[in-house]
Image (tube, rainbow, N blue to C red):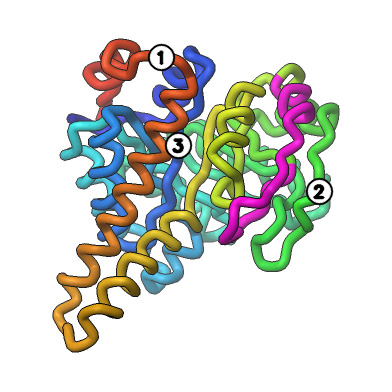
Amino acid sequence: MLLATTRDLIDHFGAGNRAVLAFNVITLEHAEAIAIGVERANTGAILQVSENAIRFHNGRISPIIAACAKIAAESSAPISIHLDHFQDLALTEHAIDLANDLGVSSIMVDAAHLPHDQNVRQTRELARRAHARGLWVEAELGEIGGKDGAHSPLARTQPDEARDFVAQTTVDGLAVAVGSSHAMTSQVAELDLALIAQLAGIVPVPLVLHGSSGVSDTTLVAAIAAGMRKINVGTALNIAFTGGVRRFLATNPDVTDPRTYIRDGCESISRTVTHLCTVLDAAAAHNPTTSDSALLTGLGTR
């Protein structure tokens, strides 16, 4: 299957009052394991690579993104490539310029650490640059907790400010602060479902939930029902991978071939991905084999 685009995936899932899952990739093995998990669930998803992941790969954008695009293009599931939390201005501009050649169809430009007026100006300019290349653009209004010591989960996005921010910046999706926090390792976050519904009613673009690993399955389902349309998943995959590797090495302490224990870590990622896709789709009360038939056959565009 050819690469899907993030815009098409979000439009497809949103039309059914559902949310597309966006899984963070750190290594090639992450990408392969995620694709397998999505295929098992017979659905579509987004592979996203953050600026931090690019820095882990020595600041080189092309190798890991090209690998993700190849995995997505050869998958039987519709999968798009997204750039997540790009904050450094020069790197963001460079990534936007490379996007079309690498199969990237969307980017999250992260200027939320800046004062509000600067956030608006920088986001607007980067959105203009990205839109000129056909990219779907996500931004964040106010930092969501947990990222580099950012604001606490008590931070909340104000609906009127969110509406005005979207109008001023022309972004296509908005990450909002509704009670979640990045890098949570236990599912104890309490989302403000009433605020999500209020935001969904006033903000004219899809809402994005960051920090979903700290949210229970039941609450994620409720958040989608309230209006969330893109759900980012990162830490849950790291927990799964590391747990799989640790369990294998605990019972096989003399193993030195990384293929053996990495395989267990990857299988743990795949199971986590399939679980999340299946739980959220089942809760949407639809039949994946019928309602996703168009998705599975018609969204490959690159």
Q: Secondary structure at mark 2?
A: loop
Q: Is residue 93 visible?
A: yes
Q: Earlier in the sequence, mark 1 or mark 2?
A: 2
The part of the chain drawn in magenta is 179-200
* Residue at the spot 17% in from the left edge and 83% down from the top edge: 255
- What residue sits right under mark 3 in the picture? 21
Q: Whole-Å distance between the Cαs marked 2 and 3? A: 23 Å
Quadrant of the drawing holding the C terminus: top left
Relative depth, front residue between 229 and 189: 189
Quickly name the residue at label 1.
286
Residue 177 visible in the picture: no
Query: In this rendering, would 212 be left or right of 272?
Result: right
Quarter holding residue 36: top left
Q: Which mark is residue 155?
A: 2
Q: Amino acid at mark 1?
A: His
Say few, some or many: other residues with alpha carbon within 10 Å of mark 1 (under 14 / 14 to 19 / 20 or more): few
Q: Are marks 3 and 1 in contact (CB under 8 Å)?
A: no
Residue 238 position within the rendered picture, expressed as x and y whole percent measured from the top left: 43, 62
